[in-house]
Amino acid sequence: GIAQGIQPLASREHGQGQRQQAERLLAYGLASMALLSLALYGVIFCFAGPIAQVFNSQNSQTLQQIAAQGLRLYFLAAPFMGANIILSMWFSSVEQALPAQVISLLRGLVLVLPLAFALAAQGGMTGVWLAVPLTECLTALAGALFYGGQNPGVMLALFPLVPPGKHQGACHSSNAYP
């Protein structure tokens, strides 16, 4: 819901040439998402057992342990998922289709399947549970790189050792802000 809430507002600000306002909306969206993700993960971490029990009608102790551990691992992805959805929507709002599409493809197909197989081979069930959080984390990093490519100051903060001028983003276009 946060991404859908900021999308029309960011699009309007972009259309009016108000980059600072559009970025402020992005920052508010990401901050709200971070707080909600932290709260959600706290609830899931503390109540993973009772949540898993709702779906464990046979009262299998093995299933209960696997599901409780799985909830705690899988929902590590929550802040990264939120960031990816918000960034993808924001890029669409400011006429940057390439990064929006790349984020969607990375998280939905390109990374998740190979990581699921690789992590399952290395870590068994724990690896399977961690495939989504790792996929979302790597995708969020790609989103940050795309965003930083539009904002060299962000890139310098993220990667201070990269020489100046070496961090042109893949989303530089004639539609970008002045």
Image (cartoon, rainbow, N blue to C red):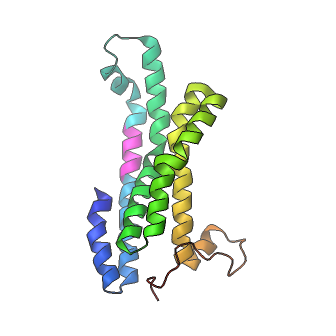
The vertical placement of 84 against 162, above or below, is above
SS majority, magenta: helix
Image location (x, y in percent) of residue 7:
30, 67
State which quarter of the image contains the N terminus: bottom left
Image location (x, y in percent) of residue 114:
59, 41
In the figure, is residue 95 to the left or right of 114? left
Q: Residue at x 47, y 85 (%)?
A: 174
Q: Considering depth in this image, is 72 or 143 the residue closer to the camera?
A: 143
The vertical placement of 108 against 26, above or below, is above
The vertical placement of 158 against 107, above or below, is below
In the figure, is residue 156 to the left or right of 135? right
Q: Quadrant of residue 154?
A: bottom right
Q: Quadrant of residue 162?
A: bottom right
Q: Residue at x 46, y 82 (%)?
A: 176
Q: Considering depth in this image, is 138 or 67 the residue closer to the camera?
A: 138
Q: Residue at x 44, y 17 (%)?
A: 63
Q: Quadrant of residue 158?
A: bottom right
Image location (x, y in percent) of residue 8:
26, 70
Span shown in magenta:
36-43
Q: Residue at x 47, y 34 (%)?
A: 72
Image location (x, y in percent) of residue 90:
38, 67
Q: Considering depth in this image, is 139 or 31 the residue closer to the camera?
A: 139
Q: Is residue 24 magenta?
A: no
Residue furthest to the bottom in view is 178
Q: Is residue 39 magenta?
A: yes
